[in-house]
Amino acid sequence: MATSPNPTRNDFEALLNESLGGAEGGFEGRVVKGTVTAIENDFAMIDVGLKSEGRVALREFSMPGQKADLNVGDEVEVYVDRVENMNGEAVLSRDRARREAAWDKLEGEFAAGNRVDGVIFGRVKGGFTVDLGGAVAFLPGSQVDVRPVRDVGPLMDIAQPFQILKMDRRRGNIVVSRRAILEETRAEQRSGLIQNLTEGQIIEGVVKNITDYGAFVDLGGIDGLLHVTDISYKRINHPSEMINIGDTVKVQIVRINRDTQRISLGMKQLESDPWEGAVAKYPVGARLHGAVTNITEYGAFIELEAGIEGLVHVSEMSWTKK
């Protein structure tokens, strides 16, 4: 830049701005490349081309749970917060540089709906903090796993995929989910497993949950419903009368709905139907002994054998009593 023989204050300001990258596009507020000139105690001295170097804490160059891998002469990117502080040093930040770069990348991944890699490194109220390559995201407790997790320790400080649910750069807010990844993976596994199953197939599974209407059986990565009416031919009031959580049971696949990925199971189908041959075994007019299983206003149900009951109507109980 040419100057007059007697430079004015404006000439000097123009030269200064030029040395710092221009009046509007100066160093401040930008991510620039610098060189590590020295490592002293817990700080690295970085030269970014200003009249003075800046100090950056070594911890800013390390990932959560890891040590900084930094040597003299390395070229690094840092964010220039201020060209000079009260001590005459440049105020630099490696964290801010990583955060700015991470946000640019994450916005692209979020728009494309892609997964991102991150590391759970801390606990906060209602969830956990995740480092996404420089940007810090919030992982709600409900989004850690498909089931409640009592101990998150084994999941911390290791790289794993996450799905971005929401992000707002202006507020610096990112919400991620690990559960969405697991559910997607399980859905893929379920589709693959269902393709290998057929109706009528006999398979072993483990009872994982019991409800009033039946039990859910894990068939090796996919669950099937064993309805209470398909557990036994005899009358039972609750599935726990026949099975318990953790039991290994042999079941038959009764029905598969590949559209909804639902599987209906049966246990009684593995036994012979007691009603086969019942007409010959219990002819009309025969006198039999049985156990009362249920009493209603209109009569009583009598069990002749497991799976076969008969109704004694209230009008058939006595000739004299009403």
Image (spheres, rainbow, N blue to C red):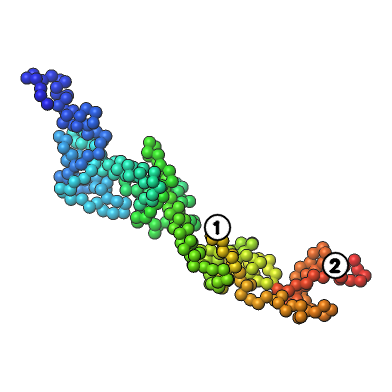
**Residue 296 shows up from this direction:** yes
Residue 223 vs 270, above or below: the answer is above
Q: Quadrant of the C terminus?
A: bottom right
Viewer-proximal residue, 136 or 317?
Answer: 317
User: Looking at the image, do the residues carrying marks 2 and 1 touch, with CB atoms under 8 Å apart?
Assistant: no
Give the image location of residue 75, x and y in percent: 18, 46
Amino acid type assigned to the residue bearing label 2 in the image: Val
Secondary structure at badge 1 equals loop
Residue 99 vs 290, above or below: the answer is above
Q: In the image, is 156 to the left or to the right of 199?
A: left
- Which of the labelled discs sits on residue 260, or is there none? 1
Viewer-proximal residue, 155 or 262?
Answer: 262
> Could you tell me which residue is drawn at 38 percent across and 36 percent down?
170
Give the image location of residue 318, x and y in percent: 89, 71
> Could you tell me which residue is drawn at 29 percent across and 43 percent down?
101
Q: Earlier in the sequence, mark 2 or mark 1?
A: 1
Amino acid type assigned to the residue bearing label 1 in the image: Thr
Q: Quadrant of the N terminus?
A: top left
Quarter holding residue 267: bottom right
Question: Distance of mark 2 from mark 1, alpha carbons?
Answer: 45 Å
Residue under circle 2?
Answer: 314
Quarter holding residue 66: bottom left
Secondary structure at badge 2 equals helix
Q: Residues within 10 Å of mark 2 (few under 14, many from 20)?
A: some
Residue 240 vs 91, above or below: the answer is below
Q: Residues within 10 Å of mark 1 (few under 14, many from 20)?
A: few
